[in-house]
Image: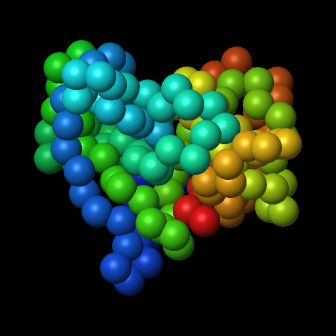
Amino acid sequence: MSQTIVLSQNLGGGQHGEGVAAGAITPGHCVMQDVNGKLVVQTGAGTGAPAWVAKEDALQGRTIDTAYAVNDPVFYHKCRAGDELNLLIAAGAIAVVLTDHLTYAADGTVKKATGGDALIFKPMEAKDNSGGGAAVRIKARKV
């Protein structure tokens, strides 16, 4: 299993960003700014919001499994097409196959895109978390 969130970047790929956590954020969560400019997990399910993904804080010796707490500085990746990431797929999410697309769930994770959902990521592996009680990692490419 990969121990980093940004697996690879396209030439001229995404950019590094830093912010302050307004709540708990796990590396691999999709994030956004709240009304106060702090970072929270992405709540815009199925929307075409910019793809920002929380990264691990390796500078503090933290791993992809170490969550940020309220008021912690948060490192995040501003994704561009072709960037490959280690994301979190929602607990109990519908099974994903390689021909699917992923979109935002309302809790910072991603889910299989259906209907009119924005197509944000393309899975790089199949994943069935339909019976899972917790989010699990999935490798995906920004479209």
* Residue 37 in which image quadrant: top left
In percent of the image, x 17 and y 20: which residue is there? 71
Rendered view: 40 above or below 5 = above
Identity of the residue drawn at 29% across and 22% down: 35
Q: Where does the image place residue 132, in percent across and percent down from the top left?
A: 74, 24
Residue 62: name its quadrant: top left
* 12 on left or right of 71: right
Q: Is residue 125 left or right of residue 21?
A: right
Q: Is residue 97 left or right of residue 12?
A: right
Using the image as rendered, state which of residue 22 and residue 127 is in the foreground.
22
Colour theme: rainbow
The answer to which quarter of the image holds residue 6 is bottom left
Who is closer to the viewer here, 33 or 63? 33
Q: Quadrant of the C terminus?
A: bottom right
Above or below, comparing residue 80 to residue 39 in the picture: below
Q: Report whether residue 54 is seen.
A: yes
Instruction: Give x and y (percent) for residue 56.
Output: 31, 44
Residue at 63%, 22% (x, y): give it. 134
Q: How far across and how far down the image is residue 109, in percent? A: 57, 34
Can residue 137 be seen at all in this image of the molecule? no
x and y percentages locating residue 83 in the rendered image: 48, 67
